[in-house]
Image (cartoon, helix red, strand yellow):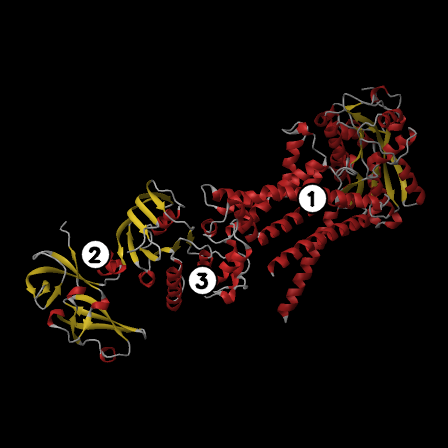
């Protein structure tokens, strides 16, 4: 087996980002509002809902992959989409995996605010659209934790993206699935090289986010 | 003082025990085969009989043919069961393998969607079928993992006058085993080259049909290769011999002839050393 | 004469559902006036916070209305200071979000509010690093930055020590006087109420039991429960005598213990005699009309500022205060027999309802 060319490495890395970053953004876009809504107020059924979120956080990603597979396969409920073994399926699986993480961390951050925070903001006459900005500002360290955690989870995920993506060369092959494949084929040097790229990627992204987090503290 | 000594002895004993367990788990014979052989279930039927007869417990590792041959040449295995004749002959020529005994055969099949957009049904030969698929830019799932099946794909493409590295829109490389590749082909309604055994096992689920006619270029011969005994522990080399003998034995060959009939209505393999039998 | 009410609640009925059941708050009439502090006093669970939130417009009453004549904002400060991330000055600027004020105007107001509450030196400090007392000042300064017409405080002095409470009350009182804001504060603590109140409203079991000028409520509570709530600690049962002492009616507890009072009453009625501790005097040679009989000292507690004395008088336990380090406080001992007196003006009567 000839070692992959630089072009191929770039392609796999680019695809990894092209799948992971949109998944992160979508998970944040859906998860943040839900986390804020749940975390901010007391209502009937809040406790079982938070329980559900916590369970989701601990759900094995490969199980999520299996469920998404069932949903997307030809004879499944969403078979019409023909998303199985395509990048869309991988993004979907990763959104489902990251969503409980985002919701859970966000609602914990909102829940940590002072009891009377919301009332105080209202009685200071802060208009509605500023209130959301203020809330996000108050929990921004918690938000950043959510982003870092979700991104780390998404980048390192292999089981679900393998199951729903199929590791197709030129189509759905990303760093994690490629590493798995080359390891199984006995091509350990190539696998190690890809692993180095993946770890490098995570270091860069985590480093960027941590820098933002720490500057926020000062 | 005695306490400490006792403690160390205990640790040593536990370590010994753990190692012994490990050795036992490794099995008496390391057999490396390909994923399609494993997936067919044949070894699951044959190996218990082998153990009963010889007391040898075989440990099976399934990888792509390329990796299997490499393990053979590195003497990381005791005996190989593969279906990549070219590579096998090279291994024997290099001396890494000391014998090559073909034991059974079947055919590859080009499977595809019943609609058959590339017109494979009317192909004149398997090579012609590949040519049609490429010409129609139809979807095709390649193993892409240097397995025996993958090598056959390349051989067919060469025979069809295509560049083995040719990629047309619709060409998908899974880098995965036969079962996974078949599932992908089923999902994507693509053509795929498969060994008959795995295909039959997956056929109903993936809703694809065998579209090709059997031909010499689709012939798939399985052989047992013994790794050079000089590079193995003597007892292992001996057991490798026993395995080879077992696979060539008339009784075993008869079992191979029947294997699969119950499940698929037809046997998956044709043994090569059976005495001529009356027509079924 | 005082100005017109800036906030008026009438015929209020608020219904709350909570985990422990439903709760109903009623208040017939409650007014807030500018340049004045009304303290709503009541034990926990009496509905004080609910009442305050209704005045703020955060709760909708099932009946009745709250009318506001305020031209400026109605602001509230809560039990938890809820500081925002960032500097103290930034916290105050948050109050201006979405409001049309120039940068110069904002800065001026922030400076003014910080000065008012003596935390101008902390302007650039991170709000999260402030001490408890400083955070309370921050919360108040933040509210004042808005130049409110009405300020509602929900237990906003909780967690401060005695000195902190006094100091903050002084600053708040000055702020009320200087800005003319109408303040309503809710508390269960009598001391805090007394530090701040111009008027007191007593809330018990969801009902507005008494509302009036501070001294009226403190000196003339309408019922036994209210008397206990407002610190009228000396409450003894007695019968109105047919005898009089000069101009004053006489209430008899027993033959040796009779109390003269200015309050109107009819002979033969059973009443509670109520005397605030600060109006109960020991061994001071006042006129005979003040004398109420002898008692025995049961206990003395000296906290360095005031001496609290418990006395057994006619079988009841009475309390009074002396200033530490002066006169009687230096020589008084447990077991001593003392002569007690109280000015008839200060003796309050609460009729005992015959049930």
Residue bearing mark 1: A20
Estimate how packed mark 3 is, as few (under 14), some (14 to 19) or many (20 or more) residues with alpha carbons within 10 Å. Answer: many
Q: Are dots 2 and 3 on a single chain?
A: yes
Disc number lying in front (1 or 3): 3
| Residue C177 found in image quarter | bottom left
**Marks 2 and 3, how far apart at CA:** 36 Å
| Screen quadrant of the N terminus of chain B | bottom right
Identify the subunit bearing mark 3.
Answer: C
| Screen quadrant of the C terminus of chain B | top right
Up-down relation of residue C52 to residue B201 (above or below): below
B210 horizontally vs A120: left or right: right
**Marks 1 and 3, how far apart at CA:** 48 Å
**Marks 2 and 1, how far apart at CA:** 71 Å
Image coordinates for residue C103, horizontal then vertical, percent: 55, 56
Residue bearing mark 3: C137
B63 horizontally vs C178: left or right: right
Disc number lying in front (2 or 1): 2
Identify the subunit bearing mark 1.
Answer: A
Image coordinates for residue B272, horizontal then vertical, percent: 86, 29
Q: Residue furthest front?
A: C1
- Callout 2–callout 3 Cβ contact below 8 Å: no
Q: Are dots 2 and 1 on a single chain?
A: no
Q: Of the numbered discs in the image, which one, if any, rests on residue C224?
A: 2
| Earlier residue among tags 2 and 3 | 3
**Residue in front for this viewpoint, B41 or A101:** A101
Identify the subunit bearing mark 2.
Answer: C
Image coordinates for residue A43, horizontal then vertical, percent: 45, 43
**Residue in front for this viewpoint, A106 or C348:** C348
**Residue in front for this viewpoint, A28 or A185:** A28
């Amino acid at each position: 087996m000839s070692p992959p060319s630089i072009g191929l490495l770039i392609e796999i890395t680019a695809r990894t980002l092209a799948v992971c970053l949109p998944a992160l953004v979508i998970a944040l876009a859906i998860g943040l509002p839900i986390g804020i809504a749940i975390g901010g107020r007391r209502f009937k059924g809040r406790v079982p809902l938070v329980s559900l979120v916590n369970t989701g956080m601990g759900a094995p990603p490969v199980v999520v992959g299996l469920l998404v597979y069932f949903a997307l396969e030809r004879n499944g409920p969403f078979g019409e989409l023909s998303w199985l073994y395509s990048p869309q399926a991988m993004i979907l699986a990763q959104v489902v995996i990251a969503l409980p993480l985002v919701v859970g961390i966000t609602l914990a951050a909102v829940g940590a605010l002072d009891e009377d925070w919301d009332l105080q903001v209202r009685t200071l006459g802060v208009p509605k659209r500023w209130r959301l900005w203020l809330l996000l500002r108050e929990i921004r360290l918690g938000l950043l934790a959510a982003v870092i955690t979700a991104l780390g989870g998404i980048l390192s995920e292999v089981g679900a993206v393998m199951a729903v993506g199929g590791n197709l060369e030129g189509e759905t092959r990303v760093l994690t699935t490629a590493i798995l494949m080359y390891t199984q084929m006995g091509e350990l040097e190539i696998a190690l090289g890809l692993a180095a790229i993946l770890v490098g990627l995570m270091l860069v992204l985590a480093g960027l986010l941590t820098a933002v987090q720490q500057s926020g503290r000062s | 003082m005695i306490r400490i000594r006792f403690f160390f002895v205990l640790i040593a004993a536990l370590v010994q025990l753990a190692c012994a367990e490990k050795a036992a788990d490794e099995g008496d014979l390391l057999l490396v085969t390909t994923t399609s052989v494993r997936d067919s279930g044949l070894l699951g039927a044959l190996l218990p009989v082998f153990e009963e007869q010889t007391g040898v417990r075989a440990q099976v590792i399934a990888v792509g043919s390329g990796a299997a041959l490499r393990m053979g040449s590195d003497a990381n295995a005791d005996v190989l069961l593969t279906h990549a004749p070219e590579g096998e002959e090279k291994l024997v020529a290099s001396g890494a393998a000391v014998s090559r005994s073909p034991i059974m055969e079947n055919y590859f099949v080009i499977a595809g969607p019943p609609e058959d957009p590339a017109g494979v049904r009317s192909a004149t030969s398997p090579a012609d079928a590949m040519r049609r698929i490429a010409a129609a830019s139809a979807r095709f799932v390649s193993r892409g993992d240097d397995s025996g099946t993958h090598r056959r794909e390349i051989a067919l493409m060469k025979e069809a006058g295509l560049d083995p590295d040719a990629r047309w829109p619709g060409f998908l490389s899974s880098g995965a085993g036969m079962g996974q590749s078949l599932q992908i082909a089923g999902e994507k309604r693509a053509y795929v080259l498969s060994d008959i055994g795995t295909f039959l096992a997956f056929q109903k689920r993936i809703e694809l049909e065998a579209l090709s006619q059997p031909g010499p270029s689709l012939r798939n011969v399985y052989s047992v290769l013994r790794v050079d005994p000089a590079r193995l522990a003597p007892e292992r080399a001996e057991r490798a011999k026993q395995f080879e003998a077992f696979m060539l034995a008339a009784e075993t060959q008869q079992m191979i002839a029947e294997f699969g009939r119950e499940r698929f209505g037809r046997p998956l393999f044709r043994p090569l050393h059976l005495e001529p039998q009356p027509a079924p | 004469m005082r100005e017109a009410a800036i906030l008026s609640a009438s015929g209020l009925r608020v219904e709350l559902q909570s985990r422990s059941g439903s709760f109903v708050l009623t208040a017939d009439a409650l007014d807030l006036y500018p340049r004045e502090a009304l303290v709503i006093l009541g034990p926990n669970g009496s509905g004080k916070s609910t009442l305050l939130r209704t005045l703020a417009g955060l709760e909708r009453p099932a009946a009745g209305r709250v009318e506001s004549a305020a031209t400026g904002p109605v602001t509230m400060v809560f039990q938890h200071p809820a500081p925002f991330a960032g500097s103290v000055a930034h916290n105050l600027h948050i109050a201006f979000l979405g409001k049309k004020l120039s940068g110069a105007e904002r800065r001026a107001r922030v400076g003014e509010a910080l000065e008012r509450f003596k935390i101008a030196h902390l302007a650039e400090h991170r709000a999260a690093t402030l001490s408890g007392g400083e955070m309370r000042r921050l919360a108040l300064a933040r509210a004042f930055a808005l130049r409110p017409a009405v300020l509602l405080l929900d237990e906003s002095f909780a967690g401060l020590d005695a000195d902190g409470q006094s100091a903050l009350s002084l600053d708040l009182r000055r702020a009320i006087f200087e800005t003319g804001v109408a303040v309503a504060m809710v508390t269960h603590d009598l001391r805090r109420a007394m530090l701040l109140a111009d008027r007191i409203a007593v809330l018990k079991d969801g009902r507005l039991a008494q509302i009036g000028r501070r001294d009226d409520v403190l000196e003339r509570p309408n019922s036994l429960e209210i008397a206990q709530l407002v610190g009228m600690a000396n409450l003894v049962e007695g019968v109105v005598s047919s005898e009089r002492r000069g101009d004053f009616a006489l209430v008899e507890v027993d033959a040796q213990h009779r109390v003269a009072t200015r309050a109107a009453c009819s002979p033969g009625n059973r009443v509670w005699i109520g005397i605030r501790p600060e109006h109960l005097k020991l061994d001071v040679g006042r006129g005979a009309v003040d004398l109420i009989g002898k008692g025995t000292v049961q206990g003395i507690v000296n906290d360095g500022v005031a001496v609290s004395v418990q006395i057994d008088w006619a079988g009841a336990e009475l309390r009074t205060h002396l200033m530490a380090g002066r006169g009687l406080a230096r020589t008084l001992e447990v077991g001593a027999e003392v002569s007690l007196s109280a000015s008839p003006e200060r003796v309050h009567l609460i009729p005992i309802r015959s049930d």
